[in-house]
Image: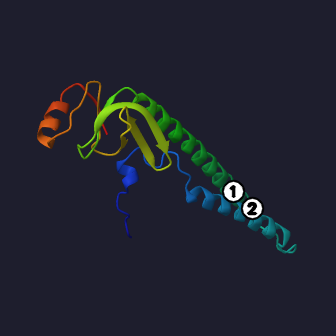
Amino acid sequence: MAVDPISSATANPWANAGSSTDASNNASLNYNNFLKLLIAQMKYQDPTDPMDASEQIAQLATFSQVEQSIQTNTHLKSMLQAEALTRATDLIGKYVKSADDTLTGKVKEVEVYADGVVAITEKNEKILLQAGVVFSDTPLTTGTKDTADSSTDTDDTDNNT
């Protein structure tokens, strides 16, 4: 059995928070197909040998499970979008340092996209929120990794995403 590697979406909790996936569309197609098959099966069944009642109940239970799964996925997607927006607004006013240690600044606004979140500093520099980005209540400096890391590993660092 093949196992897929860990995707960047797993490493980045911001990624795909608001995206629409083909999985929900495929589930919807399967849901509609299931209904059509069930109706066709009932319509064309042999009157001399009707479908077993327990088999029909099992199919209806499957139908109900598919419907509930679709609704659960829709609600989960909405919750993830709301969480991404809440987390993004909490970053405004914080100081940020990019993962590659080249950009720093105070976050003035945050843009949420389907595939991630971008923090915009007061200097209009855009920093993609990804692993290695550092946030703090106090100003951060860029420079060599050794000096920057030693200054941000103190208790004043709020979030190391």
Image point (67%, 62%), residue name: 29
Residue at the front extreme of this rendering: 123
Residue in front for this viewpoint, 126 or 147: 126
Residue in front for this viewpoint, 45 or 149: 149
Image point (21%, 25%), residue name: 155
Question: From what the image shows, is residue 42 above or below residue 61?
Answer: below
Question: Residue 14, percent across and down?
Answer: 42, 44
For marks 1 and 2 on the same chain, the one whose residue lies earlier in the sequence: 2
Residue in front for this viewpoint, 109 or 26: 109
Could you say which disc has been placed on residue 35 in the image? 2
CB under 8 Å between callouts 1 and 2? yes
Tell me: 111 left or right of 130: right
Residue 89, by quadrant, is top left
Tell me: 85 left or right of 55: left
The answer to whether residue 153 is seen in the rendering is no
Question: From what the image shows, is residue 70 above or below residue 46?
Answer: above
Q: Which residue is mark 1?
A: 63
Can you tell which of label 1 and label 2 is closer to the viewer? 2
Residue at the left extreme of this rendering: 146
Question: Residue 137, percent across and down?
Answer: 29, 24
Amino acid type at mark 2: Leu
Residue 32, by quadrant, is bottom right
- Disc 2, SS: helix
